[in-house]
Image: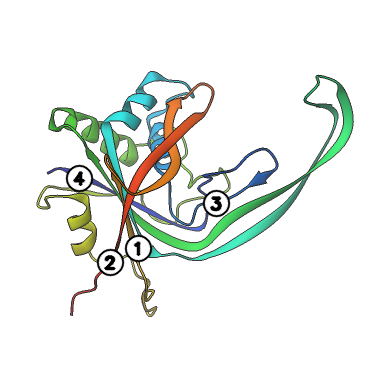
Amino acid sequence: MKLLLIRLEGALQSWGEWAKWDERDSSLMPTKSGVIGLIACCMGLKRGDPLIEQMHRKLQFAVRGDRPGEIMTDFHTVHSNTMKTADGTVQDRTIVSHRQYLMDSAFLAVISVWNPMDELMLDRCAEALQHPKWVPFLGRKSCVPSAPLFYGCVTEYTSPEEALQKIPLLVRHGKNPSDTILIRCESKSFGSRHPDALTDGANRAFTMNMYEHFPYVQEG
C-alpha cells in the first residue's frame, strides 16, 4: 500500500489534545488533528475549508515516538483593557496561561488512506509538504521544524504498523534510542480514545478517534 512519511522533529513541539482556554496541554505524541492541520497549512488552506474535513475522514494516521523528549510548561500572562468576559462585559484584566511543550522530540508519522481509491490525496499532501504555501510549524507557531517534513513515499509495506516497525529510527548521532518506543495506529474498531477527529473545522469541534498501541521491536 502507498504510505506518506512525515518527519516531525524540532527543539519544541506541542500537540494539544484536551486543551481548553487558559490551560494548554500537549499530548505525548503528535495528534491526527495536529498533523492534518500541518498539511493544511502547507496547502495554504484556511480554517473551515471543506478539504480539511475530507482529509480527516479519508486519511489514516499512525505515528512512532522515536525520541519522546521531555515535557516543559511555559508560563504566560496576557493583559488587555478590552478583554471580554463570558457574560459579554469588558474588563481590564490579566489572564494567566500555562502551556506545555515537548522538548527535543522526534516522531515519524505515516499517512495512508482507508480506501485505495483516495490515493491521489496522498500525492497532494506530499506535494504540499515539499512546497509549502505557508510556513509550517509543529503544533504552535513558535515550534519550528528542525528537519524537512517530507520523509518520502513508500509502497513496499502492507500496513502503517509494518512500516513503522521496519523503517530505521530517527536517531541523533552519538545518542542511544529510548528503551521504550511506542507506535500508535488509528483504528476503525477498537483501542484507546483520543479527541482528535475533526467534525467541524470552522468551529474547531472534535470527537473521539480510536487508536491501537504497539511497542517498537528493535531488530537484533
User: Alpha-carbon distance for marks 3 and 1?
Assistant: 17 Å
- Mark 2 touches mark 3? (CB < 8 Å): no
Give the CA separation, mark 1 to mark 2: 6 Å
Q: Which dot marks residue 182?
A: 1
Q: Give, as a three-letter code, the residue at label 1.
A: Leu
| Rendered residue at 21%/34% (across/down) | 123
| Of callouts 2 and 3, the N-terminal one | 3
Find out whether the residues at labels 3 and 1 contact each other: C-beta distance under 8 Å. no
Residue holding disc 3: 26
| Quadrant of the rendered image containing residue 32 | top left
Q: Is residue 163 left or right of residue 179?
A: left
User: Looking at the image, is mark 4 or mark 1 nearer the viewer?
Assistant: 1
- Rounded to the nearest angstrom, the CA distance separating label 4 from label 3 is 26 Å
Q: Which residue is mark 4?
A: 3
Nearest to N terminus: mark 4 or mark 1:
4
Q: Quick one: which residue is furthest to the right in this view?
A: 92
Amino acid at dot 3: Ser
Q: CA distance from mark 4 to mark 1?
A: 19 Å
Q: Nearer the viewer, residue 24 or 173?
A: 24
* First in residue order: circle 1 vs circle 2: 1
Q: Secondary structure at mark 3?
A: loop
Q: Are marks 4 and 3 in contact (CB under 8 Å)?
A: no
Residue to which mark 2 is pinned: 216
For badge 4, the amino acid type reads Leu
Earlier sequence position, callout 4 versus callout 3:
4
SS of the residue at dot 4? strand
Q: Position of residue 190 (x, y in %)?
A: 30, 45
Q: For the residues marked 4 and 2, what is the alpha-carbon distance in whole angstroms?
A: 18 Å
Disc 2 versus disc 3: distance between alpha carbons?
22 Å
Q: Amino acid at mark 2?
A: Tyr
